[in-house]
Image (spheres, rainbow, N blue to C red):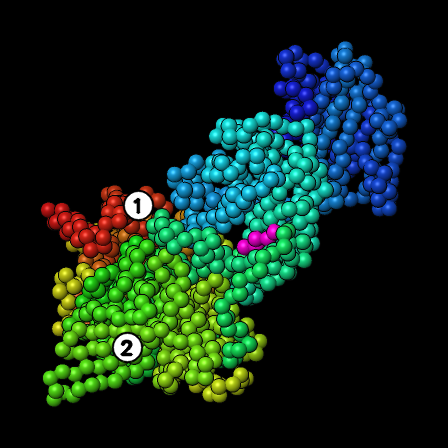
Amino acid sequence: MIPGQAERQKSTQQIANRMLPIDEFAFKPPRKAPGWWGPAPSPGGAIELSRAVGSKVPIFANLVSCIFTEGPGGRARASGAQSERAERAAAKKNANPISYTPTPYHQAGFGRLAAAIESSPGIASSEDTGKPFQAIYRHRPQPVNPPARHRHIIHLPPGDLPLGYTAKVMVSKEKKPPKGRSVKERAQDDLVMSTNSSSIVSKRSVERIYYPDEPHFFRFFVKKFQRRSPLINRGYHLRLHVIDVAVRNFLKRPSAKTKVIINLGAGFDVLPWQCLTRYADDCKDVIFVDVDFPDLMTKKRNVVNETAELNSILTNLRHPDDPVLMLQSDQYVQIGCDLRELDRIRLAMEKVVSINDCEFMFVAEVSITYMETQAADSVIQWASSLGQAEFCLLEQILPDGPDHPFAETMLRHFDKLKTSLKSVASYPDLGAQKTRFICRGWPDTHVETLWSAWSSEKYLTSQDRQKLNEVEPFDEWEEFAIFGGHYCVVTARTSQPAAETPRGNVMSLENIPSLHVALQFGDRGKPCHRRFGASMALENSTGDQFIADAFGLGNTSRLKSLDLYRSDRTVRSVNLASTGPPSRMCHSIVDLGIHGNLLVGGRGSPSSPLKDCWLFDKARKSWSQVHDLPTPLYRHAATRLASSGLALVVGGKTGSASVFGGCLIYDPEKGWIECEIKSEPKYTPASGAILVCTGSTSTGSLSEDSTSVIYQGILAGGLLEDGTMATQSFSWELKHSDASGPTITFTPITNSDENGQDTGIPSLLRRYGSSAVLDQQGHLFVIGGIVEDKVIPHELEILLLDITGPQLRLLGAGTADYVSDSATDTIPRPLLIGMSTSQIADGRVLITAGGATCFSMGTYWNKGSYTLKYPRTHQASTETLEYRNTWIFHETVELADSSVSQLNGKLDSLGLKPSLVTIPRVRLDSPKAFTEVLKAGKPVVIEQANLGCCVQKWTPAHLVNQIGADRKVTVHEATTAKMDFNTKNFSYVTKGFGAFVQELENGGKMYLRALSEEQPADRPANLGEDFPPLAEEFQLPAELSFVTENIHSSVLRMSGPVNMWLHYDVMANIYCQIVGSKRLILFPPTDVTELSFGPGASSSSINVFGELETTSLANTHPHEAVLNPGDVLFLPPLWLHTAAPQSNLGVAVNVFFRNLEGGYSSGRDVYGNRDLAAYEKGRQDVARVVNAFGKVPHDMKEFYVKRLADELLTKLHD
């Protein structure tokens, strides 16, 4: 058998079986000749055929037609007879044809054989002349692949056949491709077919979760169920539902004609079976037709044949003897044909129905977009030519151009799969798609986005949407909207359109003042991937401003950290407390002036809202928990009430499918107070709305018995409980009085100005998830978010309004003009979703973080930070702003939960700093003395240990000489003195050892932790194996024989002026200082809950050396050691430690050893810090315990989890 052909053997067997009911066929050559690909038959080689009855009849064949071409290595490769056209083409390429008559030696043994026996006797001969063929042998100077398009027929002399039979043996080296398709094009078709596989897995997930009470049909095409994310489930459900509604409407519409529903590029879609069960009465006499590539339809036909649940629904099921019409029944037909071959498809349909007596509906769900645009357009044109017809198309569009971050991610995804979207460039928006259909015979065409379909009563009622929100927790609304906004739904008919209902007064972009916002990009450093956090301003001791973007969602989980941003001119850092609120997202932070920054609510999962609130003390740079919300909230709107210490919270979500209907005021002294709501027309509760306070007025005086303050502001947009955009925009007035409870009144904002002109402002403000920033001049920036029906065009991404007058005034809308230090810089366009915004001291607005999961096509993260400011003139301007500075990322600060510390009482509230304990220094005189050190379990510095001649010899020059200047080593290269493993503020760089040492001597911020030379990912480092010359100069003293006998690894460490992050090691180890000096701070294992170690993490981001002088580590017990050359530090297991160099160059050998009899992790542990097996298993048990509480309210869940935690500690002490 020729190499590369094995995977096709099964299909060839099937071809043979269809030609003759035989159950076995094989060619059995007696021997193999040298130099051949596959078996080379000898004279008399037998083709053995077995008939259905089981009797085997040997048939000996004499070859009458063949062709050979030279393959790799000069080996002959058989390919069969060529066409005359191929002969001429070969001649043009200087081929040398030679007449050759085959001998018995070249009998039909090459290739793979498919056999057929016809039941009528006759004389075997050439089909055209009745004479034997002559074979042609070609010799070519270079290896070539023989043509693969031909069906090669070899006739066998009748004398060698059983009486009454004629044999025809066909050598089929490749399947016959569609006419006119090149090899490259056929490979492209295969890739397009592969998109079916991922699509049906997602549809199967939807089927199981969203349709639990219906028969499931996708399960027969998907071997293993995979639950997709809520976003993908919701998106695919909407796709399927839109198609289902279009088909349902077609089925229910009365017609005297036979209805035919044709699914173009159907793949493994199960639309026929769904309709036959959902709408059984409407499907009488309806025919469903699936059309797709023959290979795909063959697989689908096999599944249908083998599955009773599928074929039992179909009556009169049969398999026509037709290469295109692959399966036929009274209800369902399969056509295996390339959609480009429209004539063949029509011919197949004419065998099933009378086209003139039919009414057609065509469905194309993300299928024809993979075709060349001209071919796809031909399909649309052809479908309209069949008479009375409807068309439902769903495919991708680029409503805001290919540079929109979602569009960019989508296009890159399909390009990576080599299934580029062909039509999207020609028909990028709804208008282009509508014109496309009208011009091709569909005068009645309606277009909308998939996001618009979600809100349309045509597809879903409000009750339907609310029920869907209860199926599974869902809160990815921004991502759902931009996904839906990049897909169009086209519904078209060949009939003439009815008069369209005029749309409401929609403001065109031409009527909106153009706004050019200068946007400066800062891309230094590596902030965390973060979205749906919240930001706040703070200052260091010298008054320099920082912006902290706190918590939010990271790559895989919710974050318990803050990203700090600063001006590039700021020199001094800011020290923050190391503890704070638990991780969360979709929370708010409100600046309450001297009272601090108030963090309100947020969520874990969409079904786990939080009610805890925290206050950040600006002076002490620490968090403290304050009054809880009366009900857990996230996605709420929050703002400071003018210059007071009060905060207003409106709306928000109390769970995945419920919205809070109240308004709350936070008073630092009284806690939360609920407002009485007055509104006409009625205010409808929403989440994620725009909320700003625009001013205040006071009544009464301090000398009077009662005073009140009236605050004014704006509330607009948001998302209603059913998941649709709130079309409401209000001005509000809040009356807060000492004598009575607060009352808030909502008044609708009108569309008209004082001259009766439409301002369009209310509709422009109706956004969800946007940011609103009010500057000191009364200018309101509205940035990003999502809107109803579509993707926000870049011309409207940023709004600027003047709120100083009696009515809102739109100053302009637009996108950003990027400002960069270099004219050649490429500034990435931000995705203004999930970002955080803050106003900085000079009036500019800082945009940090943000991004979105782009459905199943990847995640887009904003890069760096953006600073924007409106030009000084209110005209479209190219004015260049003179920036005093650029805002850049500074560092990430990890936080530990404050809850444990608060239960034990916070010592830092007393203003106490931690006291340092000096680690004792000892001298060992025997191995027994070290055994006593091990038993004590406390760190010590061992003095005067005999480490060999390394302490004297290991100069930089000597190290380079011993290791080799060209030896490649991988080092950590940092940009700051404080390395952080969690945020990876360093890069792994491979350097020559000589260059690395030279850079260290020059003060380079680098660090080497040597790895195994041979297997760095699998084996621990070993000084003797990795650096033999150095191992000869280093030794462990005899007093440390226990270490030598139980050694795990020996690691060479070299560092410049960089601090090692705080971490712990599971294995005990000794740190032998050879060159330079180093200061280490150690904490006992009991301090782990105070030092910001995340679950399962062995590293913390706390800046220990910076915080030792503050009260933030008051509850810890730091120990200090300074190591000089020759000193050895014993580090007991789990002691947390960090190190800072006291010299430009430090060299050490770190030896890890096992001091436990068992309990270590059974997995690979290259670094000696993998947690014990019991802990790894315990973490899995913790997750199961928490999940066991299911949908229990959060406060009850917290109650029981705390009880379990207390019980665990009690068991430990017992």
Q: Is residue 1103 above or below residue 270?
A: below
User: Considering depth in this image, is 938 or 792 the residue closer to the camera?
Assistant: 792
Marks 1 & 2, CB-CB < 8 Å contact: no
**Percent x, y of residue 237:** 45, 48
- Tell me if residue 1047 is in the magenta stretch: no
* Numbered disc 2: secondary structure: strand
Earlier residue among tags 1 and 2:
2
* Numbered disc 1: secondary structure: loop
Task: Identify residue type, mark 2.
Answer: Glu
Q: Which residue is mark 2?
A: 733
Q: What number is the disc on residue 1101?
A: none
* Main SS category, magenta section: strand
**Percent x, y of residue 383:** 66, 47
**Residue found 61% across the figure and 51% down from its top:** 493
User: Considering depth in this image, is 715 or 330 the residue closer to the camera?
Assistant: 330
User: Considering depth in this image, is 1191 or 92 the residue closer to the camera?
Assistant: 1191
For marks 1 and 2, give the CA distance: 62 Å
Q: Examine the image and state in which quarter residue 556 appears.
A: bottom left
Q: Which residues are magenta?
A: 489-493
**Percent x, y of residue 429:** 58, 62
**Percent x, y of residue 479:** 44, 59
Label tally: 2
Q: Which residue is mark 1?
A: 1161
Q: Examine the image and state in which quarter residue 37 appears.
A: top right
